Image (cartoon, grey):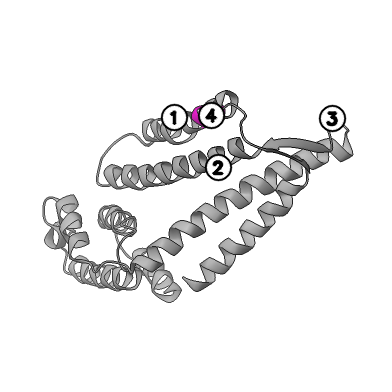
Amino acid sequence: MNTLVDENNEKREQLNVENKKVYEDMLVYVRLSFDKSEAETEEVLMELLDHLLILQEEGRDSRALFGSDPKQYAREFVGELPQAVPKKVSSLFMMGICYFLGFYLFTSGLIQTILAYGFHHLEQTKTYSLGTTIVGLIMGVAALAILAYSVFRYNQWSCFRHTSKIKEYILSGLMFAVLPGVIVLAMYLWLPSFGPTVVLPVYWMGIAGVVFLIIAKLLERKI
C-alpha cells in the first residue's frame, strides 16, 4: 500500500499547476471516504493519475477526464468503490480512540507527576469519583468521534472550492479547536462528582496512557 502512495506522490509532481490542483482535491475527497476499501481506492486513484498524465501530454486538461463538475464526478466515483470490511472500520475507530486516550492520559499524567514530585505544586495522590470519571471518558470519546467525523466531512466539503485559505484556516480552527476545547472544559467544570471514590497516585495516568498507546500500536499493525 505504501508503494502505491509513494508512487502517486512522485507522479503527481509531473502534473501542471491546474491539473495538480484538481487531482489533489479529487485525491483528498476520495481518501476521506473512510468506509471504502483502501487498497481498491489507491489502485483506482493511480489509474486516474496515469490517465490524466496521458491527457496532459496530449495538451488536454482535467476537464477531459473529470468533466465540468469534478466534485460530482468524485461523488459518483466514491459511490462505485467497494465498501471496507466492517471489522477494519471498527479497528480504525478503536485505534483512534486508543491513541486519543493514550496521548491525553500520558501527557496529563506526566505533567501532574512533574508538578507533584518535582515542584511539589500538587498532591502526590488524587481522589477520583468513578462515576464521574467513566461518564467523562464516555462523553470525551463521543465528542472525539463527532469531531473526527466533522473534520472528514468539512475537508470533503472544502474540496474543489476556490476560497481564501486564510479564512478557511480561521473557520476550521474555530470549529475544530476552540469550540471542542470550550465544550470539554465546560464538561470538566460542571460535571458533578458521584459514585465510589478511589485514591490513586498522580502518575497512574501516565502508566494508563502508555498502555493505551501500546494497544493502539498493536491495532495499527493488524490493520
- In the rendered structure, the answer to whether residue 163 lies left or right of residue 76 reads right
- Mark 2 and mark 1: span between their CA atoms? 23 Å
Of pointers 1 and 4, the one earlier in the residue sequence: 1
Element type where label 1 sits in the image: helix
Image depth: mark 3 or mark 4 in front: 4
Placement of the N terminus among the 4 image quadrants = bottom left
Say what amino acid the circle numbered 3 marks.
His
First in sequence, mark 3 or 4: give its number: 3
The span from disc 4 to disc 2 (Cα, nearest Å) is 11 Å
Q: Which residue is mark 4?
A: 187
The residue beneath circle 1 is 174
Residue behind mark 3: 121
Q: Are marks 3 and 4 in contact (CB under 8 Å)?
A: no
Mark 2 in CB contact with mark 1 (< 8 angstroms): no
Specify start and end residues of the magenta stretch as a single range.
181-185
Choose top left, top right, bottom left or bottom right for residue 42.
bottom left
The foreground one among 41 and 6 is: 41
Give how far apart the Cα atoms at labels 3 and 4 are. Answer: 24 Å
Q: Secondary structure at mark 4?
A: helix
N-terminal of the pair, mark 4 or mark 2, is 2
Residue depicted at x 53% and y 67%: 219
Q: Which residue is mark 2?
A: 137
* Residue 182 in the image, given as x and y percentages of width and height: 51, 27
Residue 80, compared with residue 124, is above or below; it is below
Q: Which residue is rendered at x = 40% and y = 67% of the image? A: 88
Residue 189 location in percent, x, y?
A: 59, 24
Q: Gap in Å between the C-alphas at discs 3 and 1? A: 33 Å
Q: Amino acid at mark 4?
A: Met
Circle 1/circle 4 CB separation < 8 Å: no
